[in-house]
Image: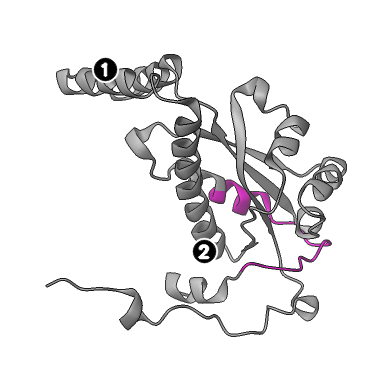
Amino acid sequence: MTLIDQLQWRYATKKFDSTRVVAADKIDRILEAVRLSASSSGLQPYELFVITNKELREQIKPIAMNQAQVTDCSHLIVFAAWDNYTAERINENFDRTETIRNLKTESGTAYRQMLLNLYPARDPELNFSHAAKQAYIALGTALIAAAVEGVDATPMEGFNPQALDELLNLKEKGLRSAVILPLGYRKADEDWLASLKKVRTPSERFVNWLR
């Protein structure tokens, strides 16, 4: 199937088959796609937490408005964004880039200094908001990668981030939860949405050509 076919196939699954587990190689490819995702200045200001522990997911369920996808899915991914941009985090990224590429340039040094002058001085809440937007770019990559693998996924904002942060001890890691993503396989006969046609804005109203 083509990518467009797979995107036509995917939808925000409402009912997962709790008896089915996504193969490790599929999960690995989805996670690798996220790792390779685009991010502003290449900083990747977020981390992933992949949760398979059933007891922990039972604790998360009431935090996520008792949505069954949290416990019925195969893997639950938490996208946790940096709570702030710091000089240490920025320098770590640029140091890694220079080491891997074995290249240090004047323009790269100037760009590093520009970010060091800009980000750490800003309000932490503004920086978290920016980092969370980068996590959402990665979420989009995860959704596409899952579709390619034939794995169902449900992006979810319906949860209490403060409670989830406390449960996962994210504050101590300098992180805050941004969005969660259950992965698994649909239970089509019990999912009211599975058989319905996908609805999107028509292309002629969605795409504006300026020629």
Q: Residues within 10 Å of mark 1 (few under 14, many from 20)?
A: some
The vertical placement of 126 against 66, above or below, is: above
Q: Are marks 2 and 1 in contact (CB under 8 Å)?
A: no
From the image, tell me which residue sits under label 1. Answer: 113
From the image, tell me which residue sits under label 2. Answer: 148
**Side of 147 where 113 appears, left or right:** left
Q: Is residue 88 magenta?
A: no
Q: Which residues are magenta?
A: 12-30
Write down the quadrant of residue 102 in the picture.
Answer: top left
Instruction: Count every numbered label the image shows and give the total.
Output: 2
The Cα–Cα distance between marks 2 and 1, rounded to whole angstroms, is: 39 Å
**Side of 94 where 172 appears, left or right:** right
User: How far across and how far down the image is residue 31, in percent?
Assistant: 56, 45
User: How far across and how far down the image is residue 60, in percent?
Assistant: 80, 44
Instruction: Name which residue type carries label 2.
Output: Val
Residue at the image position 32 percent from the left and 23 percent from the top: 118
Query: Quick one: SS at disc 2?
Result: helix
User: Which mark, by number, is residue 141?
Assistant: none
Q: Residues within 10 Å of mark 2 (few under 14, many from 20)?
A: many
Instruction: Name which residue type carries label 1.
Output: Gln
Q: Is residue 24 magenta?
A: yes
Residue at the image position 62 percent from the left and 50 percent from the top: 27
